[in-house]
Image (cartoon, grey):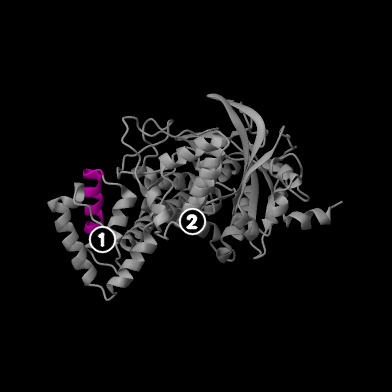
Amino acid sequence: MTNIKDNIKFGWNFDNTYVNFPKLFFSKIKLDPVRSPKLVILNDELAKSLGLNSENLKTPEGVSILSGNKYAENGAYIAQAYGGHQFGHFTILGDGRALLIGEQINPSKERYDIQLKGSGRTPYSRGGDGRAVLGPMLREYIISEAMYNLKIPTTRSLAVVETGEAVIRDGIKKGAILTRVASSHIRFGTFQYISSFGDIDQLKSLADYCINRHYPNISDDENKYINFLKEVIRVQASLVAKWQSVGFIHGVMNTDNMTISGETIDYGPCAFMDNYDPNTVFSSIDTRGRYAYKNQPIITEWNLCRFAEALLPILHENQEKAIEIAQDAISNFYDIYYTNWMSIMRSKLGIFNEEAQDKAIIEDLLSMMEKYNEDYTNTFIALTFSKNKNEGMFSSTEFINWYKLWQERLKRQVQSSELVHELMKNSNPSVIPRNHRVEEVLEAADKGDFDPMKKFLNILSKPYEHSQDQEEYSKLPKPSNCKYRTYCGT
């Protein structure tokens, strides 16, 4: 029987629909309790938006649910099956260390997946232990919340719980479980998996489900599956344009890390670029630069091709015609991406309207930034607040000439200089989760001191505030001969 008081106590309001799919789509999971769960952090603002009682979730009983030691009433408790192209090679995957607690309906009647990450082995774990490490789980919490505040579509983090157990990676690490929230966890790889191992009716049912859940505006369209492909292309083009605009590098853009909803997911070896260099790669496993900053739009298009291939059976009964339809849809990706990117970059430079010269103004600035090794974020802040340094790029003749052309461009607008300044302030974050700062707070957390992380999260919560408190966090790291590297942390 349902414990109604328990649901009221925590605010659970589950309506689990994914469990209605055939067993090919998921596996039911039994809890794998941890030894000594201890709450590290809980996102009160997110909990409230979900209709959850954050104070009760902080109690021992609530922490038991967030650690996977106790069932939430009416929870789904499933691991989802999917495949994915990992560095170009298709692999059978699935939630190897995660389980879906359930689909929460928030007070605004919106549906969100609530998932535990690091909760133990599943049928998809392969050789893994199903557990996660404290540092990477806190890293995902920090970066995903920073992305949310940068107004970039993303999964979010509700809580991190220490397990009190050791995890063996490159040494003995502290175990932890992340509670992740997403519009859904359905990936390109989900469609690849069902297309490979299911039948056409199952593929249609998955597409119908995603349309009803994420794109209800096309649910009655005559060619809804074609339009579904176009919608996913549209949101992914918008997403990667936003990544590029803040210097974010995902690190592992496999097809299992691309969501149907258009949200950023799986913050493994991700990082933010300091000095502008299109070739920047942070991931230790990306030895050939497949997922370098400059390649992210290209890889997004490649991944969309793989998604479109999975949809071919439902795009048209004639395969040649289906391929033609898919190719036609994919061919629009770059134009959609470029239009989004140009719009954002215009805003970063205070440009309200469109002129043919804008492309050269933007690209010439980026070229100079690369040549003079200028910081990406701080360069735009300097332009926003007219704090041009008398050194490096800013003292060069080419910058002086560029600056004159830019100012002339702004004068051709009807908007006042005050409006230009406001647009730039709202388009250029003063603070990002710089890599050296992330490492500092994670090192402190590993020693049991979580105050630096909480302060950092507060700073990152208002990236467009441009406050004095943020200035310290905008400083660059000390010069080093060692390139910054990130790791999957699995």
Distance from label 1 to label 2 (Cα)?
25 Å
Q: Earlier in the sequence, mark 1 or mark 2?
A: 2
Q: Is residue 115 visible?
A: yes
Which residue is more in the foreground, 28 or 12?
12
197 shown above or below 390: above
488 shown above or below 103: above
Q: Which mark is residue 35?
A: none
The answer to if 169 sits in the magenta stretch is no
Three-letter amino acid code at the position of disc 2: Asn
Within 10 Å of the Cα at label 2, are there few (<14), some (14-19), or many (20+) other Cα atoms? some
Residue on which disc 2 sits: 149
Q: Quadrant of residue 416?
A: bottom left
Q: Position of residue 139 (x, y in %)?
A: 52, 41
Q: Residue furthest right?
A: 1
Count of numbered labels shown in the rendering: 2
Residue appearing at x 42%, y 35% in the figure: 283
Q: Position of residue 294 (x, y in %)?
A: 33, 44
Residue appearing at x 67%, y 64% in the figure: 107
Task: Report the magenta stretch's main SS.
Answer: helix
Q: Which mark is residue 386?
A: 1
Which residues are drawn in magenta? 359-373
Q: Position of residue 348 (x, y in %)?
A: 33, 60
Residue appearing at x 67%, y 39% in the figure: 38
Q: Residue furthest left?
A: 397
Q: Position of residue 5 (x, y in %)?
A: 82, 56
339 shown above or below 317: below
Which residue is more in the foreground, 308 or 240?
240
At numbered mark 1, what does the secondary structure look like: helix, strand or loop?
A: loop
